[in-house]
Amino acid sequence: MNVTENPIKKFVIVGGGTAGWIAAATLSKSLQGSDTEIELVESDEIGIIGVGEATIPPLLAILESLNIDLAEFIKATQSTFKWGIKFEDWNRLGESYFHPFGTLGRPIDGNDFYQCWLKSRAQGDNTPLMAHSPEAVLSEHGKFFLPFEARNTPLQAAQYALHLDSGLVGKYLRTYAESLGVKRTEGMIECVQQHPDGAIKSVELKNGKQIGGDFFIDCSGFRGLLIGQTLGNGYEDWSEYLPCDRAVTLQTKGADEITPYTIAKAQKAGWTWRIPLQHRTGNGYVYCSKHISDEEATETLLNHVEGEILTEPKVIPFTTGIRDKAWDKNCLALGLAQGFLEPLESTAIHLVSKTMAFFLRMLPDNMPNQVLINEFNRRVKADYEEIRDFLVLHYCLTERDDSPFWQYCKDMPIPASLQQKIDFFNVAGGLIPGTEVLFQATSWYAVFDGMGVVPSRYNPVLDAIDYPKLKMSMDKGKQAIVNIVQKQPTHRAFIEQYCPAK
Ligand code: FAD
C-alpha cells in the first residue's frame, strides 16, 4: 500500500448555513479519532438564507448516520412529520393530487401494482390510485404514526420526512459538530489567497486574520465565494426549463391542526407553499419575475396565508441551475454554492448530504486527483439532472392556459432526457429501467396521474390473471389501509406524545 504523501490535515468550511453545518457534522463524525482539523468560518453580518423547511425521507438516514436521536432532533428543531406533498391547481384549477413517499399497493401474483391498477381501470374500476397509498390515506385523515410499528401490514412500507426550522437545525448541528472538535470562527472573508497552480491556500478575514487549509468546502450560498468568484467556475442556467427565479417568504403563527404534508398550490405565476411546524407555519410564493412583480407576488402571498403574520415578507432572488464543476482543485462546493433546483420537491438539503456522503467515499489522499474529481462531478450533475427532469414534469404536463406563465410552461422546451421518460411511460406504463435514483416509480406515477396522464395500455400479461381475483386482492389491500389508518393518532396527538418541542 502506498504511503500518503499529501494527506488532508485541515479542512476549512466557508459558510455556516445548513450546508456548512451539515458538512461540519458529517466530516467531524467521519473523521472522529483522526488528527484532521476542521474549521468553519461564517459571517454573522451576512447571515444565512434561512429558508429550507421541507425535506424528503433520506434525511432520516442522515440523522441515523450521525447517531442523532430522532425524537430529540424533532423536539429541538420544532419539526413536524411529512408524508408527501399535496399539489393544488397544477393540472387544472380546482383539482388537486397527492405525491406520497413510499410505495403504492403491493405486487399481486408478482405483477407490478401499478399495472394491476391500470388493468382494473380498463375494466371500469374508478378507484383512485391514491386509495392504495398508505401515505395519501394517512394524510387525508391527518394521521401520523411510525411505520415500523405496523409490521406485516400494508403500512409498514410507508415513508416519511420532516418539516423543520432550518435556523434551529443549523444551531443543532453546530452544537453537534463543535462537540466533535470543529472550530468555529466568526468573521467576514474579504479575500482569498491561491497557490501558483490556482488551488486555494487561505481565506483572509476583514480583521486581517488568515485561515489556511489543505481542502476548502465552499458553503457560502449563492455567492459561491471560492468555487465561483475565486476559481472562476461558471453556472449552467436552467431557467429555460425551471423559469421561477424569485420567492417571497413569511412566517405565520402555527395552526391548531397541523397537516402531515406540505401544500404546494399553483398560482398565476408560480406556486405557494405552506409548511406547518410545531411553533409556526412557513409560507412562500415561488414565482417567475417575467410574469409578476415582487409587489404583486407579496400581495398574493399576504392574501393567501392564514393566521397572524409573524415576519416581514422577504424576497429572495435565485437562478435555477448548477455550477459547472462542483469540485475543482482543492475546493468542493455544497448547498446553494453548488446549484439550486427550485424548492418544489424539497431536494436541496438532501443534495447537500448526498454530495457529502459521496465525497467521503471518494476522499482524496493526494491532490489534485483529476480522476476522482471528474467522476465526482459527473455523478453530481447526473443527480441534478434527474431531479430537474422530475421537477419539470410538474409544470410541463399542465392543462392550464389561464396566465402567460402557465401558457409558457405548457409549451416550453423540455430536456430530451425528460421527453424520453414521458414517451416511454406513455407506451410502457412505467419508468425506463435503471434511470431514477432518488424519486422512484411511486413519485413519477403520482405526478403523471395527478396531471391526468394515463399510459395507453396495461401490460397484457395481466390478461392471464383472473380479474375478479385481482380486484378482490386490490380491494382487500385498500380496506386494510383504511382499517389501520383509523386506529392511528392525529398528527398533533402523535407529536404531543412522542416529541413535543422544548
Ligand atoms: P446560506 O444559508 O446562504 O449560507 C451561506 C453562509 O455563508 C452563511 O453562513 C454566510 O454567513 C456565509 N458567507 C457567505 N459569504 C461569506 C463571507 N464573505 N465571509 C464569511 N462567511 C460568508 N431546501 C430544502 O431542502 N427544502 C426546502 O423546502 C427549501 N426551500 C427553499 C426555498 C427557497 C426560496 C430557497 C431559495 C431555498 C430553499 N431551499 C430548500 C434550499 C435551502 O435553503 C438551502 O439549500 C440551505 O439552506 C443551504 O443553504 P446554504 O448553507 O448553501 O447557504
Image: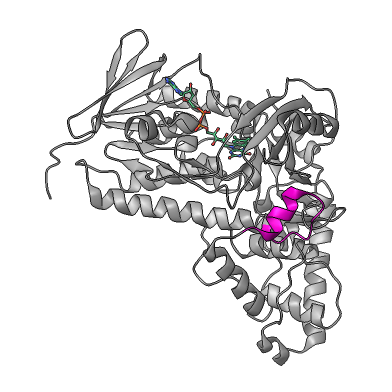
Q: Residue at (69%, 31%) from the top-left corner? A: 248
Image location (x, y in percent) of residue 209: 30, 11
Quick one: quadrant of the C terminus?
A: top right
Q: State which quadrant residue 498 falls in.
A: top right
Protein image colouring: one colour
Q: Residue at (74%, 52%) from the top-left corner? A: 406
Image location (x, y in percent) of residue 478: 80, 67
Q: Residue at (38%, 43%) from the top-left corner? A: 326
Q: Is residue 358 left or right of residue 56?
A: left
Q: Is residue 392 magenta?
A: no
Q: Is residue 384 left or right of residue 313?
A: left
Residue toward you, 280 or 425: 425
Q: Is residue 405 magenta?
A: yes
Q: Is residue 448 left or right of residue 256?
A: left
Measured along the vertical axis of the image, is residue 296 above or below residue 182? below
Measured along the vertical axis of the image, is residue 131 above or below residue 388? below
Give the number of marks.
0
Image location (x, y in percent) of residue 260: 75, 43
Magenta highlight range: 396-412
Task: Decide if residue 107 is in sight here.
Answer: yes
Residue toward you, 302 or 404: 404
Q: State which quadrant residue 366 falls in.
A: top left
Q: Residue at (52%, 39%) from the top-left corner? A: 63
Residue toward you, 212 or 128: 212
What residue occupies the far bottom of the structure in this picture? 464
Task: Decide if residue 279 is in sight here.
Answer: no
What residue occupies the far top of the structure in this picture? 207
